Structure formats: structure tokens, C-alpha cells
Image (spheres, rainbow, N blue to C red):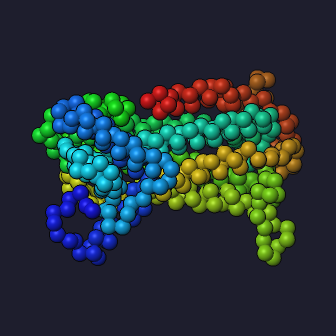
Amino acid sequence: MKLWDKGYDENQRIDDFTVGRDRELDLRLARYDVEGSMAHIKMLQSIGLLTADELTQLLSGLESIMADINDGRFVIEDGIEDVHSQVEFMLTQQIGPIGKKIHSGRSRNDQVLVDIKLFFRDELRKISEATRALFDELQAQSEKYKDVLMPGYTHAQVAMPSSFGLWFGAYAETLVDDMHMLAAAYQVANQNPLGSAAGYGSSFPLDRQMTTELLHFSTLNYNVVAAQMSRGKTERCAAYAIAGLASTLSKFAMDACLWMCQNFGFITLPDEFTTGSSIMPHKKNPDVFEILRGRCNLLQTVPMEVSMLTTNLPLGYNRDLQLLKDVMFPATEQILDCLEMMRFIVGHIQVKQDILDAKIYDYLFTVEDVNRLVLSGVPFRDAYRQVGEAVQRGEYKPTREVHHTHLGSIGEQIRTKMDQAQSAIKGA
């Protein structure tokens, strides 16, 4: 069954090629297709295109289909093109020809747009919640290890004293920026395209404000052409938000791989979180961080895939856009998986104490000693030269005292920033 069936059979090879993985991928859209249909038929009844009795029958049928979806019984059968066709086919089987009325005033274009936007709205909420859970874990580790010092580096050279609290806290605050990107993508998705039909509106007196309220969109795409243009734009915004998160996770994973190396030895994982070598009995490999790094690096290519699919398409719907599901649906699964694994593993990181006692970190304290001289009245340039010349002569002896203050770098200020960033999604 095809919603566009006009009484002739399509070539099977063409059908297989153009449908692609839609039957598989559309299963993730099924509940949203039913939700959109329920809102649409309520609106149709309000403008006189359905009777109250017809609405009751249609809603009952759609509720039955939703129960199948929730119980995992819903399938897109062979010969059915997509989720929209399957829902209408099942509804017509259950209640008869009345089921065919649900498509009045709609095109498959705005139907899939509604499904996609509802899907991304939910997925971005889930991703934001997983991001917040990782943030809270990083904050807990930051507080736990705020007084444990570690070396800081610039140009991959020993630079100044840092702390594990600052390291964990830095990634926590970086997630705030990622949350802002998620919130921006959420706002783009949270607009109702239903009623735009094929992108040029409908001659039916559709009440688009009513469906906006029923589907809990914050607003609607007023311009019907703009509504169709949002296909691809919604995915692109979500892709950039996912890639931003992936960049943060990948960088942390790289740090962890480096810090676990014996040449550094800053952190460890319990043995059961590592893997071994088939020939080297001493190996305890950080495979979990390596796989996280690899997956997140691949996720950073997603915006380019979306961009290449959507660049320079002519105005209006084009079938190329169908392929966005092949790119974006796995991406939402992958980023959630990576966020949840990172949260799990961060809570098991163990840090090494007294790292800076080693002689190789003597030069970490040069800035502290310059500042100490300045505070005693020595001009900065003279103090800098004095310490620098002692280093050059091999006579520098560090005081190993650290007096840094970092306003709000660990604690409630960062948590407040995250609360504010997340509220744009939670409060929507």
C-alpha cells in the first residue's frame, strides 16, 4: 500500500531502491505518527470535516495502534511503503473506509515533518538529561578531588600546577555550552509544520493553532514554504548539537587515555574496567576510553553528512531528504550510548595522590615563585628574570607552595549555569 497509489504497479527494483531502510527506520517514528494523526483529526472535527462519531471511531482505532506500538507489536508489513501508510492501512482494516479520512488536509510531506520534529524534540530531551547526569558526575568528582594537585600543560610541556578538581570541573562547565547547543536545536524542532501540506498550504480551513497546542509545540512554522524548508534544517541543528557533545566527550577520553599511560600514571581504572593483551601479560588497556573517542570522532562527521545531503537542493520537498534518517537516527542512539557510558566510567576513575612530589615537576612552580617575589616588592620583569636565570643555571629550587584561587571554578556557580541552560529544554 502506498498513500500515492494511482492504480499501477511500480517496478520492484525501483521500489526497493527508493524505499531503502524506511520500513526499519520508520518504526522509531510510529508513536509520533499516531500522535500527529490524533491531533489532526481532532482539528478536522472542529472545522466540520469529521463528525463527532467519526472522530470517536478514529481515535479508538489510533489508540489501539498506539497500544501495539507501546507493546512492541507494531510492524511495517511487506508491501507497505512507510509508517504513514501502515498506520492508515491498519486503521482502515479496523474501522473501515472512515480510516481513509485521516489524510484530509495533509500531505505526506507535512506528516513526516511532524513526526520528525516530535522525534527530535524527544531525543534532544533525552540527550539533555543524559548530559546533565554526566555533568553531575563530573561535578561530584571535581569536588572530591579539588585539593589533589596534578600538572598543567601548555604546548605539551609542563606549565603550572593544576588539580583534578579543575580537570573534572572544566569538562562539567564545557557541557554547559553543549547544553546551550541542545537547547537551540530543541527550539528549532519545537515548531509545528502541520497544515503546510506539500509546502504550499491547503484550501481546507485548517486550524493550525489548534494542532500546535494539541501537540505542545511552542509555536508553529507560519510560512508554509518555510515549514517545508525546515526539513534538513532541523536535522542540521541537531547534528551540530550532537557533534558538540561528541567533541567534549572525545577530548575527555583522549585525556584519560594519556593520563592512564604509565609515562604519566595520573589516573587508573579498576582492573575489571580494562582489557588485556594476548601476548603481554602486564597490559591493562583503556579500551572503553578508546572506543568512546572513536565513536565520538565519528559523530563529529554527522554535520558534514547532513550538510552534503541538503546543500543546494531546490525549493520544496526532494526525496534526498529521506536519507537524513539513515544519518541522524543512529546518531541519536550513539550519543546517548556514549553519554551513559562516560557517566558510568567517570564515577570509577581513581586519581593518584602526590604526583607533584616528583622532581620532573619542579618547574611547575616557577610562576608561583615569580609571583611570591612580586608580592614581596620585586618588579615583575626583575622577578621573572631572576627565576628564569636560576632555571638556566640549573640552580632553581621550587618552594612547592600553591596559592591559586579560582572563583566559582568548582561548585555552585557552574551548577547554576547548567540549571539555566537546561531550563530552556525542561521548561519548554
Picture mark count: 0
What residue is shown at x 69% (from left), y 30% (from top)? 410
Q: Nearer the viewer, residue 362 or 163?
A: 163
Left or right placement of residue 248 versus residue 96 in this view = right
Q: Nearer the viewer, residue 325 or 216?
A: 216
Q: Nearer the viewer, residue 33 or 132?
A: 33
Q: Is residue 52 above or below residue 102?
A: above
Left or right placement of residue 253 versus residue 233 in this view = right
| Residue 427 shows up from this direction | yes
Residue 325 image offset from top left, x and y in percent? 39, 57
Residue 384 image offset from top left, x and y in percent? 73, 36
> Quarter-wise, where is residue 403 in the image?
top right
What residue is shown at x 59% (from left), y 37% (from top)? 132
The C terminus, quarter of image: top left
Q: Nearer the viewer, residue 275 or 115?
A: 115
Left or right placement of residue 49 versus residue 82 in this view = left
Residue 364 image offset from top left, x and y in percent? 77, 43
Q: Is residue 300 above or below residue 33?
A: below
Q: Is residue 105 above or below residue 269?
A: above
What residue is shown at x 28% (from left), y 70% (from top)? 15
Residue 398 image offset from top left, x and y in percent? 85, 40
